[in-house]
Image (spheres, grey):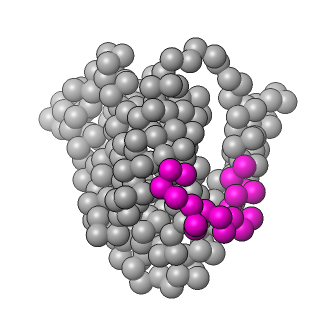
């Protein structure tokens, strides 16, 4: 049956179904709250896929998921801010690619988690008055960091959450920004020689499942009161940050 479904040799039909279900659920969660789905999907995929293919496969699925989310919510994308962010992201990617310094992953997790907690719960009204150049700097910094830290989505969404008063603008603009960052990562794996062609059928199925989840999550977002979104956003971000700190501390001590 594996061959009929054109699955890679190490993937059974049951695992393929589980991966598609995970893509649906986590994409729906991200569409509703803006963050958390990518990290959750990575954790679930870690139980189902070989370590050697985990990151590139996850990158393609996240690229597809964020593209779908950006398309569904495109009317709410703040394009002037996004273009400035993307200009900075291109600079950050080029600069990061030139560095060969290997930073300690455990320390980075702790620092990033503490930074997220601080920025989520502290009031930063200055960002609402910030000029577009601020978001170019944000693009440089977060994309540069992505060369050393696996996921910078939490940093990027905080940037937009502090700027936009409308939750739909937060989610849509973040999705479009993540399309660029995941696109850069997938391109890097392609250049490095990862055999994406072997995974096309499964990747396509997971991306379609993710798009269905995005549609469902977007309906929840539209129906959710603004105050409920802000509260849910802070709780989700705090849980992610705490989990990141715990993992980093455990790795540093163990």
Q: Could you tell whether 164 is left or right of 206 in the image?
A: right
| Nearer-the-camera pick, 214 or 139 | 139
User: Which quadrant of the figure contains the N terminus?
Assistant: top left
Determine whether 23 is above or below 128 in the image.
above
| Nearer-the-camera pick, 92 or 43 | 92
Residue 107: name its quadrant.
top right
Q: Could you tell whether 196 is left or right of 106 in the image?
A: left
Q: Write down the region rendered in magenta.
A: 115-134
Q: Is residue 151 visible?
A: no
Residue at x 42%, y 84% (from the top left corner): 223
**Residue 22 placement (x, y as % from top left):** 42, 52
Q: Could you tell whether 146 is left or right of 89 in the image?
A: right
* Residue 125 lies within the magenta run: yes
**Residue 154 placement (x, y as % from top left):** 57, 51
Determine whether 148 is above or below 213 in the image.
above
Q: Main secondary structure of the magenta part?
A: helix
| Nearer-the-camera pick, 113 or 14 | 113
* Residue 50 lies within the magenta run: no
Residue at x 84%, y 30% (from the top left corner): 253
Residue at x 26%, y 31% (from the top left corner): 199
**Residue 207 placement (x, y as % from top left):** 28, 49
Q: Is residue 128 visible?
A: yes
Determine whether 191 is above or below 33 in the image.
above
Residue at x 73%, y 31% (from the top left corner): 106
Q: Residue furthest right?
A: 253
Q: Could you tell whether 36 is left or right of 219 in the image?
A: right
Q: Residue furthest left?
A: 4
User: Which quadrant of the figure contains the C terminus?
Assistant: top right
């Amino acid at each position: 049956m594996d061959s009929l479904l054109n699955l890679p040799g190490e993937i059974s039909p049951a695992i393929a179904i589980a991966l598609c279900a995970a893509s649906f659920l986590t994409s729906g969660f991200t569409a509703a709250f803006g963050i958390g789905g990518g990290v959750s999907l990575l954790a679930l995929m870690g139980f189902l896929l070989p370590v050697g293919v985990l990151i590139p496969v996850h990158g393609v699925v996240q690229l597809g998921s964020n593209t779908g989310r950006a398309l569904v919510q495109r009317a709410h994308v703040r394009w002037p801010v996004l273009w400035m962010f993307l200009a900075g992201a291109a600079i950050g990617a080029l600069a990061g690619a030139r560095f060969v310094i290997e930073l300690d992953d455990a320390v980075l997790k702790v620092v990033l988690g503490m930074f997220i907690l601080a920025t989520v719960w502290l009031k930063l009204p200055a960002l609402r008055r910030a000029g577009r150049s601020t978001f170019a700097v944000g693009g440089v910094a977060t994309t540069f960091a992505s060369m050393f830290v696996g996921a910078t989505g939490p940093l990027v969404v905080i940037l937009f959450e502090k700027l936009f008063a409308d939750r739909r603008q937060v989610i849509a603009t973040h999705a479009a920004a993540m399309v660029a960052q995941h696109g850069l990562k997938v391109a890097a794996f392609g250049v490095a020689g990862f055999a994406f062609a072997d995974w096309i059928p499964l990747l396509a199925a997971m991306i379609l499942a993710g798009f269905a989840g995005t549609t469902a999550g977007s309906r929840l977002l539209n129906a959710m009161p603004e105050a409920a979104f802000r509260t849910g956003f802070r709780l989700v971000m705090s849980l992610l940050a705490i989990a990141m700190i715990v993992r980093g501390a455990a790795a540093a001590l163990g």
